Amino acid sequence: MVWLIQAVFSFIAAAAFGVIFNAPRKMIIHCGYVGMFGWLLYFLFESNWTDTAQASFVGAFVVALLAHILAKRFRVPMIVFSVSGIIPLVPGGSAYNAMRNVVENNFNEAIFFATRAFMTSGAIAMGLVFAEVMMQLVFRFLRRKRIQEIVE
């Protein structure tokens, strides 16, 4: 039951940010799916095997891969899907707790939460970059293969 609730709310969050970022109307549902799959993988990894940074990396990697695939499929910019899909993974709670503890002069707690937010943000960025590099390598391979078929 927890999985279903996580899926529904992450779908709503990603789709709502698709609306806020003026994604094309036909793509809003797909934005929701991208965010939902990224969040569900994050939730699966974070609750069973890894910490939040590694789980965020996996979630961001999947979001970027899905964004690439959907961008090619529907011929829209990749950013339409990736920006709204990455929203459920953003560590807003840790950043909020870091700032709250700074205001309350609990600097040890603030450093803990700030480090966690920083590591998660870095993992999200690395997941997006790694997926981009992987997709560029796949496209280059497919392009070379197509050229070789034409030459032969």
Image (cartoon, rainbow, N blue to C red):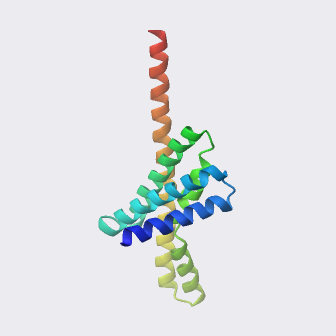
| Residue 34 x %, y % | 50, 54
**Residue lying farthest to the left in this orientation:** 49
**Residue lying farthest to the top in this orientation:** 152
How many numbered tags mark residues here? 0
In this view, the residue in front, 105 or 128, is 128
| Residue 147 x %, y % | 49, 17
Residue at screen point 66% across, 60% down: 19
Residue 122 in sight here:
yes
| Residue 127 x %, y % | 47, 53
Residue at screen point 48% across, 48% down: 66
Q: In the figure, is residue 116 to the left or right of 29?
A: left
Residue at screen point 40% across, 68% down: 4
Kindly indicate the quadrant of the structure image that contains residue 55.
bottom left
Kindly indicate the quadrant of the structure image that contains residue 42.
bottom left
In this view, the residue in front, 31 or 95, is 31
Residue 119 in sight here:
no
**75 above or below 117?**
above
**118 above or below 85?**
below
Q: In the figure, is residue 108 to the left or right of 25?
A: left
| Residue 114 x %, y % | 51, 74
Q: Say which quadrant the C terminus sits in.
A: top left
Residue at screen point 54% across, 52% down: 30
**Residue lying farthest to the bottom in this orientation:** 104
